[in-house]
Amino acid sequence: MDLVYLDNNATTQPADPVVEAIRHAQEEFWANPSSVHRFGQSARQKIELARASVATLLGTHPRQIVFTSGGTESNNLAIHGILNNATPGTPGSPGTLITSRIEHSAIREPAEAFGKIGNTVWLPVGTGGLIDPQAITDTILANADAAGPVLVSIQWANNETGTIQPIRAIVDAVEIARKQIAESQHGRSRIYLHVDACQAVGKLPVNLGELAIDLLTLSAHKFHGPKGVGALYIRRNLRLHRHIHGGPQELSRRGGTENSASIIGLGVAADLAKSFLEDHDQLTHLTALRDKFEASILAAVPGSVVNSPDDRGDRLWNTINIAFPGLEAEAILMGLSEKGVCASAGAACSSGSLDPSPVLLAMGVPEPQAHGSIRLSLGRATTQAQLDHALKIIPDVVRRLGLAMPSP
C-alpha cells in the first residue's frame, strides 16, 4: 500500500465522472457561453444544467446560485457585497460584521480587514468550538442602533475539527433579533446571515428551503469536484454589490467569462454528492470507520486526546483532530509523509506556519496540545484496509518522535 490519503478536508480527489465531464467539456463546449451563436449557447446550456444540479443539492432555485472561483472568493463576495459597498456620498458606517475566531481564514482575514473601516465583533467560543445562538441574538441587538447593515457569518462545519454548528438554532437566533428590532420600532432591520458551508456541502444534507439563510458558500473540490470553482447562494431579492467588475455574467453578480469546464465538473460533483447523501448505509459505515480508527489511535498512543465538541455538539463523519501533547505537528506530519500517510495540521492554506492553530486556541485548547495536533480526514472511498495500515504507522511515528525529544 503506497499511499493512505487522510487529508480530504484539504481537498478531495476529483471523481472519475467529474474528470471525464471536464475533459469532454474542454473538447466540445469551449466556446464563450456569452456568445449568441449556437456554439456558445451549447456551452451556456451546460452551465445552466450545472447550476440546476447545485441548486438541487442545496434545495433551492437555480437563479439563486452564482458561480465563483471557489470558497475564498464566495466568502469575500458575501462580506464585501453586504458591507463594503455603501453608496458613495451616503453618510454612516459600512456596517457591522459578527463572526468568530474559529472561522476559516477566508472569513477571519476579511473580518480583520473590515474592522479597520467598519465594526467587526468577535463572538465568544464555547467548549469544543461551539457558538452559543443566544450570544448571536445578544450581539445583534447590542449593535442594532449603529449605522449600516449587520452581517452574521458562521461556518456550518469547521474545517479543522469537524465541529458542526447548530445552524437551525443560529438561524432562529437571527430571526429573534430581527423581530425584536422590528417590534421596538427603532434601530434597523437590515440583518443578514452568511454561512460558510464549504466543509458541509456534500458531507451533510443541506436544504435551504427550510432555513432562512441569506448567503451560503460552497467549494467544488471539497466534495470530489475540481479546484478553482465554487458558488455562492444568494437569497432571492437580496441586493448584493459585486466586487469583480467587467461584465454582466452571473446575473451581474460576478463579472468575467465563466470557467465552463470546471462549472460543468461542479455540476457532476453535485449530482454525485446528492446520491451519496441519500445512501444512509454508506454514511453509517464511514462514520463507524472513523470512530473505530479514532478509538484505536487513542488506545495505541497513551496521552493522546481528541479536540472535539462536547456532548452538546456533533462532528462531521470524516474528521479527527487529535493531539499528541509535547510534540510538534509539523514533525509528526513529516514522519507520516515519509511512511506514505497524508494528513495535515489544520487548514491546508496555513501549512508551513509554526504557530499553533488559531482555531484550536480560540476553542481553549492549551498551547502545548495545539502545537501537537494533527487532522486526519477520511473520504468517501477510504477503506478499512487503509486505516489499518495507517494505524500501524501513526503510533510508531509518534513514539519515535517522543523518544527523540530532549528531557525537560
Image (cartoon, rainbow, N blue to C red):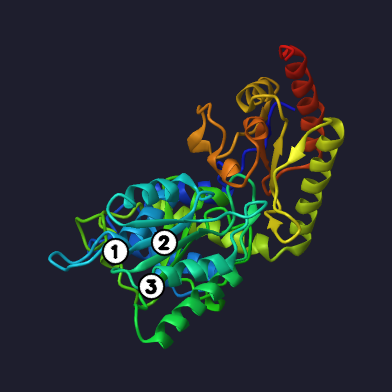
Q: Residue at x 72, y 43 (%)?
A: 382
Residue most toward the right? 299
Splitting the image into 4 quarters, where does residue 395 fall?
A: top right
Helix, strand or loop status at disc 1 = loop
Going 34% across and 73% down the picture, which residue do you hit? 145
Residue 336 pos. (x, y %): 68, 25
N-terminal-most mark, 3 or 2: 3
Write down the residue under mark 2: 232
x and y percent of residue 94 in the render? 27, 62
Nearer the observer, 333 or 381: 333
Q: Earlier in the sequence, mark 1 or mark 3?
A: 3
Q: Earlier in the sequence, mark 2 or mark 1?
A: 2
Image side of residue 237 versus residue 275, left or right: left
Q: Is residue 311 in view?
A: yes
Mark 3 lies on residue: 144
Which numbered marker is on residue 253?
A: 1
Three-letter amino acid code at disc 3?
A: Ala
Crowdedness near tag 3: few (<14), some (14–19) or many (≥20) residues, C-alpha within 10 Å: many
Cα separation between marks 1 and 3: 28 Å
